[in-house]
Image: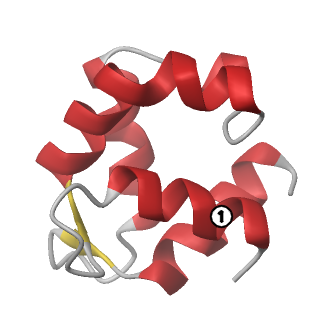
């Protein structure tokens, strides 16, 4: 996993179980998005509303099991954010 994707995944994994749920992604991006962007861990344009966060989740959840593994997350954010 790229360093940026790993840091972002860890920041969004609120319960530290190694997986991301839709609720975690939405909640964490809402609460931490501006700080993550200011630190360079997330592009400023990546800080969006709940719909944008949900769309990111849907794009990353390739197998449709409603959780994101680090690998699914990395593939989508690396592609989307150009990392």
Tell me the crowding category of disc 1: few under 14, some 14 to 19, or many 20 or more residues within 10 angstroms, Cα based. many
Secondary structure under the numbered disc 1 in the rendered image: helix
- x, y percentage for residue 11? 43, 52
For the image, the number of numbered tags is 1
Residue 18 relative to residue 22: left or right: right
Percent coordinates x, y for residue 74 in the rendering? 61, 72
* Quadrant where the image shows the C terminus: bottom right
| Camera-side residue of 69 and 9 | 9
Asked whether the viewer can see residue 77, the reply is yes
Residue displayed at 21% across by 72% down: 67
Q: Where the N terminus falls, by quadrant?
A: bottom right
Q: Position of residue 8 (x, y in %)?
A: 55, 54
Q: Is residue 50 above or below residue 28?
A: above
Name the residue carrying label 1. Answer: 5
Residue at 20% from the left image edge and 33% from the top image edge: 27
* Residue 80 versus residue 77 in the image, above or below: above
Q: Is residue 77 above or below residue 47?
A: below
Left or right of 27 on screen, residue 32: right
| Displayed quadrant of residue 16 | bottom left
Left or right for 46, reference 58? right
Q: Quadrant of residue 15?
A: bottom left
Q: Residue at x 76, y 70 (%)?
A: 3
Tell which of 60 and 35 is nearer to you. 35
Is residue 47 visible in the rendered structure shown here? Answer: no
Q: Looking at the image, which is closer to me, 15 or 66?
A: 15
Q: Where is residue 53? Give x, y as percent.
A: 37, 33
């Amino acid at each position: 996993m790229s360093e940026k994707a790993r840091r972002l995944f860890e920041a969004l994994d609120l319960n530290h179980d190694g997986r991301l749920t839709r609720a975690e992604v939405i909640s964490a991006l809402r609460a931490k998005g501006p700080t993550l962007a200011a630190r360079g861990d997330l592009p400023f344009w990546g800080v969006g509303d709940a719909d944008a966060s949900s769309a990111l989740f849907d794009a990353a959840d390739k197998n449709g099991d409603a959780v994101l593994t680090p690998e699914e997350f990395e593939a989508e954010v690396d592609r989307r954010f150009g990392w």
